[in-house]
Amino acid sequence: MIFSTISTSHTLPTPALVSNGRVYPLPFADMRDVVRLGADKIQLPESSFAMDEVKFHAPLKPVTLRDAYAFEQHVRTANHNRGREVPPEWYKFPIFYYTNPHSIFGDGDVIPYPHYTSALDFELEIAVVIGKPGMNIKAEHAHEHIFGYTIFNDWSARDVQREEMKVGLGPAKGKDFASSLGPVIVTPDALADKSVDRPGVYDLSMTAKVNGVEMSRGNFKDIFWSFGEIIARASDTCELQAGDVIGSGTVGTGCLLELTKTQGPWLNEGDVVELEIERIGILKNTIGGKQ
């Protein structure tokens, strides 16, 4: 199943089910209600819109937003660009940090360019939406707690992030100004034929374009730490809630920091960034003027 949050010229944003090229508004206040109820409880409504009649918003506002660091190629390249090896601790357990669940943008939105950075970057990621609460979840049982998957762009101010990380705490202002999610959430049953027999992982191509030029290409299946392992780590002595979102971290080649060896050029006002993940769609944003 495929879920979204949509609006029309006459309606406020509402959760919806996408099926056979049509969009069916659902009788719920927001997508969190749908997630808590469960995809298997949703029935196809009678009324619908054509895809070009609606605007797609971020599919949900996360309860919490964590971001992992799970693709080895990206981690290795990022560390190599800094003149060091991958810390051995990275191979011991999945690493993640918390970012801002309130500065969420959707497909087609203009991304604010913070006044404090001159090194704005995109990050090509996939994210999982937690559907069933749980604590101390085993990796092999993580699928029971996954509502679905969406595209995640973890916008980054690289110059600020670099300074923050030298202190040993962060990132904070290097990340918290914007995250994009969407355009839809795809449930695991719709991806079953792409499973690679690792908990929460599928064979899905991932690409990024800037102004129509392909910059990044990877595959979800290349992730080192599976979402099952990430969920197990995140839920250790901590209850995950329905509506929590966890990002994968950047796929290999999936950001300018990696592609340009930390030197740029970076994103500019008016640049159009398109992240595409097979079976999920395209998440497209334009960079706004510096505030």
Image (tube, rainbow, N blue to C red):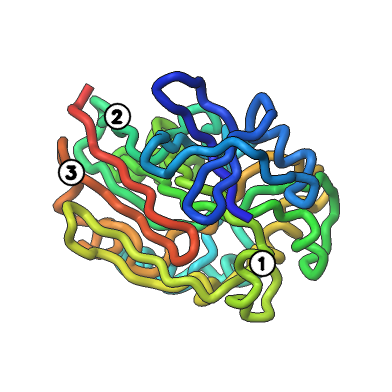
Q: Earlier in the sequence, mark 3 or mark 1?
A: 1
Left or right of residue 185: residue 200? right
Percent position of residue 240, x then y: 76, 44
Identify the residue at image location x=25%, y=58%: 209
Total marks shown come to: 3
Name the residue nearer the viewer: 9 or 96: 9
Pick the residue in front: 176 or 62: 62
User: Image quadrant for the C terminus?
Assistant: top left
- Position of 69 relative to 286 (above/below): below
Give residue 77's position: percent from left, percent from top. 35, 70
> Observer-nearest residue: 138 or 262?
138
Q: Check disc 2 and report its element: helix, strand or loop.
A: strand
The image position of residue 235, as x and y in percent, is 77, 51
Q: Which residue is label 3 attached to? A: 271
Marked residue nearer the N-terminal end (2 or 3): 2
Instruction: Mark 3: give few (<14), some (14-19) or many (20+) Cα within 10 Å.
Output: some
- Residue at point 18% right, 28% down? 289
Which residue is under mark 2?
112
Name the residue type under label 2.
Answer: Pro
Q: What is the secondary structure assignment of the residue under circle 1? A: loop
* Label 2: few (<14), some (14–19) or many (≥20) C-alpha neighbours in 10 Å: some
- Residue 149 drawn above or below residue 272: below
The answer to the question of whether label 3 and label 1 lie on touching residues, with beta carbons closer than 8 A, is no
| Side (left or right) of 3 relative to 251 | right
- What is the three-letter code of the residue carrying label 1? Gly
In percent of width and height, residue 180 lies at 43, 41
Residue that mark 1 sits on: 200
